[in-house]
Amino acid sequence: MENMDQLYEAILKGNLSLSVEMTKKAIEQKIDAKSIIDDYMSKAMDEIGQRFENGKAFVPELLMSARAMKGALELLKPLLVGNNIPRAGKIIIGTVKGDLHDIGKNLVASMLEGSGFEVINLGVDISAEKFVQSTTEHKADILCLSALLTTTMNYMKEVIRLLDETGVRNQVKIMVGGAPISSTFAREIGADGYSSNANAAVSMAKQLIAS
């Protein structure tokens, strides 16, 4: 049997090709998919996230690890469906209307996906109507709103207002983030959570799912 610690190291170091190679070998050896994810892949993402929090890793490393994790997950998805292994939760994420920034939002999406969430990434410049429609259509557990401009951050209020008006608000938790956003602003607009970085977003999402 291959040393599966190599998969952990591959994701930790952001080595996509080795991550995919080790995952293929694990599948060939019929190692349980949930074990592959929980014992190696998720632990590697937790470790790189902690290093980021401690200032020992930076955004490029996070992106590389998330890419390696995503590549491995693509191979495991058919097995997850077949074995009916539950995902951590379903999340919709997008940058609000008028804002075209997506690097931070995409990093958060990758980290969430790498941590076991099913993520629907709507992209940028998303209207309140689109957020509400997607939340209903996908029966999302969490809706993540991103904004990088002070001129667009207030549009988050419009999204939450429409969620209230359509009766969807009580069906979904709302997370907000982006450079101009603060925990105070999040509370003021009625969001359920706020995160200042990708690793914190994963922790917050897990808390919201558990609450």
Image (cartoon, grey):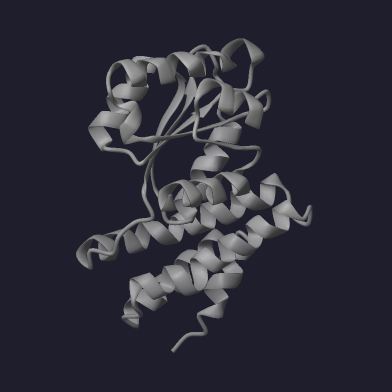
Picture coordinates of residue 164, whole percent (x, y): 35, 20
User: Which residue is found at the position 34% from the left and 77% from the top?
Assistant: 32
Picture coordinates of residue 124, whole percent (x, y): 48, 22
Quarter occupied by residue 169: top left
User: Which residue is found at the position 53% from the left and 21% from the top?
Assistant: 189
Q: Furthest residue to the bottom? A: 1
99 relative to 123 in the view: left or right: right
Q: Nearer the viewer, residue 167 or 4?
A: 167
171 relative to 148 in the view: left or right: left
- Say whether residue 55 is visible: yes
User: Which residue is found at the position 55% from the left and 16% from the top?
Assistant: 99
Quarter occupied by residue 154: top right
- Say whether residue 127 is visible: no
User: Which residue is found at the position 20% from the left and 65% from the top?
Assistant: 82
State whether residue 191 is above or below residue 21: above
The total number of labels drawn is: 0
Q: Nearer the viewer, residue 45 or 14?
A: 45
6 relative to 197 in the view: left or right: left
Quarter occupied by residue 127: top left
Picture coordinates of residue 48, whole percent (x, y): 65, 59
Q: Furthest residue to the right? A: 55
201 relative to 26 in the view: left or right: right
